[in-house]
Image (spheres, helix red, strand yellow):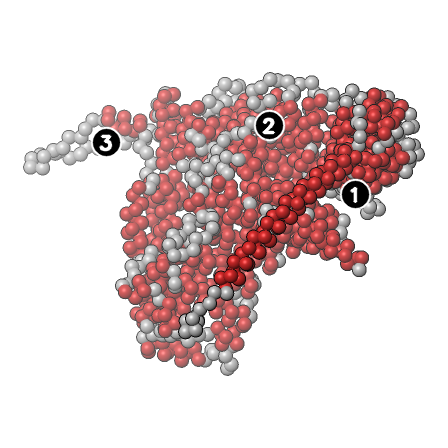
Amino acid sequence: MRSLSSRFMMDDVEIHESLDEQIASSLSAAQNAPVNEKLRHLKKTEELLLNREGGAHLIDNFLDEMLEFANLPYPTIKCFVLSFIEKACKKDAEVMRKAIVTLYLIIMASDSETKHVQVLKRAMLTCMNIYSIVLRWAVQKKGDPDVESCWEKFSVLKGRIMFHIDSENEGIRTRTIKFLEMVVLAQSIGREQSDDEPKKRLMSLAEIPRDHRYLSYRKMASEAQHSMQSLIGQTALLHISSQNLLTVLSALCNIARERPEFLSRVVDAIDVLQVNLPPTLGTSQVKAVRKELKMHLIRLMKLPSIVPHVQKISTLLSDLGASQSEIQKVMPAESKRKPTAPTKEEEPVVKKRRDQAGTSGGMDEDEDDEEDEGRKDKITMESAIDATQKYIFSRLNHKIVTNLVIISLATLPDVMPPAFQSTFTPIASAGSENQRMRLARMMATQANSKGIGPGAEMMKAEKLKALQERAVARNEGAIIPPTPAHFLKSEKGSAPVKRVPAKINVSLPPPMATTTKSKVQMNIVTSCQEMSAEERDRLFVLALERLMDTERRAQQGGAAAAQHKILVRLVARFEEKNDHLEEKLANFIIAQHKSRSDVAVLWVAEMYAQYQGFSLCFAKSQIDGRLTQKERLARYNKVIILLLRSLFERELHKETVFNRILLEAPLLTPDALSYLKLACTDPCYASFAITTLRELVLSRCRQRNELLQLLFHLTFYEKAEIRNESVETVKELFELPYMRACVRGEVERQLEECTKETPPPHFIVDGGSRGWRPAVYKAALTLPMATLTHDHSLIHVVARVFAKSTSNDFKLTTMRQIENAVKAMGQGSEELLKLLEECPQGAESLVARIVHLLTERAPATPDIVHRLKRLHDSRQTDVRSLLPILPGLAKEDILLILPKFVIHPIMAKSFGQAVKRILSAKNSETGHYSLTPTELMVEYHKIETTTSEEKKLLREHVRTVMTAHRSMTKEAISSGIEELLRLTPIPQLLFHTIEVVYELHNSLHAFLSNVLHKMITRDLWKENEEYEKDFFAAIVAMPDVSYQVALTKLSLEDLRRLMESTSEDVGRLLKAALPTLSTHQQREVPDGVLDLMGVSERPCEARERERRRDQREREERREKERSKEGKSEKTDRKRGERDEKRGDRSGRRSYPVGDQR
């Protein structure tokens, strides 16, 4: 019965407990509970925070505690934390400021360990459900740098999830497909909704402003297109499972319903899939897929934008076994009223070619030249299929079809294959023109791929004709050389030949015999005239220009590589100083940099070959015709800088050619690295250049240190976007095993530079002073702290530099910046435990800060407690360093440490934290509190002091003991005072304690009255004069409680000393308190005390006398009233007798007999 009643009392207390206290108690109970109990407590906390009224406002207060449970090695707890993040984010997106770190760590850890598939799938589901919310939050908070950093981390997670599209685990691939669906929906333009249609809160591309600071509208749209293409590509996989195929179909059709711009692509994908199902599917799976295709097509027919595709979908439904009545039932009304215009896919090829020719007039001629050949091949292919389709369609008559069926009968098996039987559906519209056209199209495609049919013959003829035209053009270009200039001069100097008119007949003599002259042999050296330097340079330039003009013909003839080599060698090998030719070739490359990047790379390679001596450029300035190595390096540097500078001046450093030159250049000179640095600091396109720098670090072993230094210098840049991008790149490099040693070496060198007298030049980027400042230290520590989470052993380097440094600014900045890294490492880090054992001399304050950060939300583990206690004992460190581990210490250790927090003036400032930690957490080894509130109160009063200053501090912190923690209840306080009263002698501090209790707890006034009564009756206050002084001070401070006891229990001499001990008029106060006593208490007051207070009689006696006098007066008044009442009664009686007599006389009057009534 007692247990039942106590249980009801506990339930009643819990009901009246405030919401935040319930949440705190639930979280505290979940800390050390088993997994199942822990999960139950966490679900209760989630219910209080998310579903209870007023709980949403407390999410931020308890979010860190909830997220810390994700560090536990239990998959069920991790999944619950992910579920909580999703629900909390739907309540308030601001949760992602803190939750993104936990989400990032969970996905990265689960991604690296195959055993955590369940956690990874739940994390992917969480990211899918909150993607639209986070993207809308990022759009709304475009000016918040924290939100930008959060979005960047979430983008990394998005890339990680998309990477799993080819995962071997089917469940993970399914989650990835659904995530891609969400990406496409959130990053594409939504359809217009009608008024009666419910509004959905799904994000769309239209909500992203074009001028957003870190969300690129174009990039978002491009990601959506790539994701859509990835989904469509999944339908063409041969080994895709049935489950994932159905998931892809559902995702594509959902996208088509919500985003009409993808409708045509989805219909085409379904058309291809319907006739090319994966061969790995079983019979039942094929049936399920075809049924799913039919269902999705019927749903698509209900869309308003489906009208242009009705014909194709009707044919697909017919092939899938739908009857004409079913098709007509879902047919849109618009398609029934009037025929739809042919879609772009259904237009004839000739019309497409004509439209393309008409719309391409605005395109550049160069782009038209580049795409001409590919477009011609595509048109030829389509024309070939059209020709074969027309040929087959014209011959699909009854006779030919019948003959084909008869011929194929010989190859049919005896038994119908189960797969064919399960997938075959009768064609409802067999023999119709549309069905015949579709059949002809399918046959034409297959025939054209096999190289048979009129279309294939037409393609062969077209290819042969094109080959002949190229051969003729090549031959013509080879046999028509330019006419030499000296030949033209000789022709002009010869005499003209005179002609004789035909009408004149002249008789000529017979020819005379003449002697033959000997032929003079041609000598080109003597015949040709030497050209001047101007003529030679002009012809050289003309030859180079002519060679540049033959680019298109060289590409058509397959000689593009040879043409590129000749161009480069003309510029690079004939003269060591030809700036005009180099400028011309550079302009030629940049004019169409997308297609001429090979020329730039070949030019750089040629100059490097000359630098190494593999190639030669004749130098007229040298006797042997060879340049020195220094001059060859200068020429190489000049060319690569010319290209990079020209691209940078034209703002083309964001293009592929700029990055390709840097990536494929054999050697990067300091000038080239300077242009790379300029590109990396570009406000808009820095990410492309930093990616190039990352690839260079990975691929250039010889220049890796130089490149790493450039990357590390970028981490000091003043722009936060560039700085964060560089830090993330370094972290990615640090994760690679073969790069870790190099990156770690640079990190250690950067830490060591923080101990120098002046900072290195690259540390100062904001134009400030050249000396050390907290901002410079913060920038220098950003990268080491970011890599600390990936390599915990770096904590020893940080501690060593911390101990070595003599700058207080550096130490303060380090203790501030280390917070996130230490929390990510956790209490289980072996390197942190090793640091506690091998702490460098001078780094004790850093170790104390680390332990403080680790124990903010969770109690210290026994390993940390023992190691830090041992460090304190051996080094005699500041006692405040033991604050984080106080709950884990034994009772004896706490009792030894507690006085140090009280009697020392500096340490006393932390006494409140010490009391709070002792009372708020249990000992991790014993599972109980090291000190109960009552024990703490008793032990505090036992602290011995020697000086007045120590006594003053001890008195001042009594209130701290009473108010530091909610566990110090009035029951605990009363129990503690009872324990103190049993001590002999009682602590002198107790008198001040009851004063504080009197001020804090009104409900304990009666208890304090009893305490004073015990003190007086047992003479506990008469130990010495100081006791008496404190006791009298307590009586004066508690008039409501003490005066009653003082009047009744103190002797006359004690009261006289009480009045003399204080400057206040205690006699007047006691006199005023006398009437408040009960009658019994007033009678206990001695007469001498009354005389001392100047009171002639007791208030109770005066009240009694007044009462008796009032009683007599009332009795006298009552007698007078009774006498008056007696006289009035006599008068009334006489008057009544007279009235009766008159009535009798009137009643005896006589009447006549007849008149009697």
Q: Nearer the viewer, residue 790 or 1099?
A: 1099
Residue 832 coordinates in the image, percent (x, y) = 77, 37
> From mark 2 to mark 1, how far is it between C-alphas?
58 Å
- Image height of 422 relative to 267, above or below: below
Give the class, few, some or many, for how many residues have Cα within 10 Å of label 3's Cα (few <14, many ≥20): few
Write down the residue under mark 2. Answer: 716
| Earlier residue among tags 2 and 3 | 3
Label 1 close to label 3 by CB (< 8 Å)? no
Tell whether 404 sits left or right of 787. Answer: left
Where residue 56 is drawn, which disc sits there?
Answer: none
- What is the quadrant of the N terminus in the image? bottom right
Tell whether 838 sits left or right of 247. Answer: right
Q: Does dot 1 land on a helix, a strand or a loop?
A: helix
Q: Is residue 784 visible?
A: no
Residue 828 coordinates in the image, percent (x, y) = 76, 43
> From mark 1 to mark 3, how far is it between C-alphas?
153 Å
Image-quadrant location for residue 281: bottom right
The amino acid type of the residue labelled 3 equals Thr
The amino acid type of the residue labelled 2 equals Phe
- What is the quadrant of the C terminus in the image? bottom left
Image-quadrant location for residue 714: top right
Of all residues, the one furthest to the bottom in this rendering is: 414
Write down the residue under mark 3. Answer: 514
Q: Nearer the viewer, residue 901 or 161?
A: 901
Residue 512 coordinates in the image, percent (x, y) = 19, 32
The amino acid type of the residue labelled 1 equals Glu
Q: Nearer the viewer, residue 178 or 1136?
A: 1136
Image-quadrant location for residue 950: top right
Write down the residue under mark 1. Answer: 971
Which residue is painted at 30% across and 46% down in the image? 359
Which residue is painted at 53% across and 35% down in the image? 144
Give the class, few, some or many, for how many residues have Cα within 10 Å of label 1's Cα (few <14, many ≥20): few
